[in-house]
Image (cartoon, helix red, strand yellow):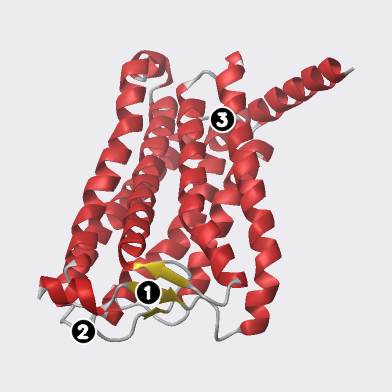
Amino acid sequence: MLSVNRTCVSEFFLLGFAPFPLFQHLLFVPVLFTYIICVFGNVTIILLVRTEPSLHTPMYFFISIFAVLEIMFASVTIPKLLAVLIQTKKNISFFGCFIQLYTFNALGVTECLLLAFMVFDRYLAIINPLRYSATMNPLLCYRLAILPWVGGFACSSFPVTFTFFLDFCGSNGVDHFFCDLTSLQNLASSDPFSSNVVTSLATVVGLVTPFFAIVGFYIHIIHTVLKIESTKGKTKAFSTCSSHLIVASLFYGSAIIVYIKPKGSHYDKFLALMYAVMTPVLNPFIYTFRNREVQNALRKNMKQFITFLH
């Protein structure tokens, strides 16, 4: 059966938004513009955190790691989406499809886990501020930064492997703008039950569990902040978490709806635009415009750049 798997389908066709031709043509310029802003915005954050001494703290270290992840996450799908929007031939090779599938899911789970570790950092800063600097030492920061990548790539290997060994001998039209687990499983000519079960289990481990961890941390954070007597202290504590809360809500809100059920629907691709395209470009602006320290660092560097030009 494995040889059949290799020979029946040699490539897939990404249907994208073909049923909506007008929407497909109108989508190209906004997606291209969004991708350029995403790369530029996240690279700016990385450079700011690297060069500005005031941002050499655990929180901004994780934000810079998150910015690197966002560039990679967007780059897995958006370039192919742009090609699908303007090309009449929307094919992708069998192995290329599964490479994209694995990379996208691995980076997605990595983002879920990193978001959980980022709120853990804020939790320590608010719950025990006096011991925060000693606890969040550089060694712990590096370990917490590496763990999401290891967990993401390990967790995603199981559903992708089970899907890879399904038989694909019928239709090869993927009803999505990238190679997605549920879309490929729906194309399989063999029973995808085991692959669906493994996908659901991986979703619980890589998506739902970090989500509930984030919710638990925020419940404890809110409970602690409400005990603070000064209004200024409450505002400062909430401001350190607000950006992360918005980013996490945007990502999880759309991703959970799509991946909590392995069967999928025809309109999942529209929800996927939110977490695969819109969220990566919104994140740098959320962290920049809602954070005074980043704003000050950005203004300082802009002034230095203008002075250098003159």
How many C-alpha atoms fall within 10 Å of the one at disc 1: few (<14), some, or many (≥20)? many
- Residue in view at x 18 percent, y 77 percent: 167
Q: Is residue 162 left or right of residue 252?
A: left
Q: Which quarter of the figure has residue 101?
A: bottom left
Between 299 and 12, the residue placed more toward the observer is 12
Q: Is residue 59 left or right of residue 159?
A: right
How many C-alpha atoms fall within 10 Å of the one at disc 2: few (<14), some, or many (≥20)? some
Q: Which quarter of the figure has residue 189?
A: bottom left
Residue at numbered disc 3: 46
Look at label 3 and name its amino acid. Answer: Ile
Q: Are marks 1 and 3 in contact (CB under 8 Å)?
A: no
Specify the label residue 127 is tagged with.
Answer: none
Q: Residue furthest left?
A: 1
Look at label 2 and name its amino acid. Answer: Ser
Q: Residue furthest right?
A: 310
Give the x, y percent position of residue 22. 68, 82
- Regarding mark 3 in the picture, which secondary structure is present there? helix
Comes first in the chain, label 2 or label 3: 3
Whether 80 is drawn above or below 72: the answer is below
Give the x, y percent position of residue 177. 48, 70
Residue at numbered disc 2: 189
Whether 116 is drawn above or below 205: the answer is above
Q: Is residue 262 left or right of residue 255?
A: left
- Residue in view at x 12 percent, y 71 percent: 2
From where the camera sits, is residue 209 visible? yes
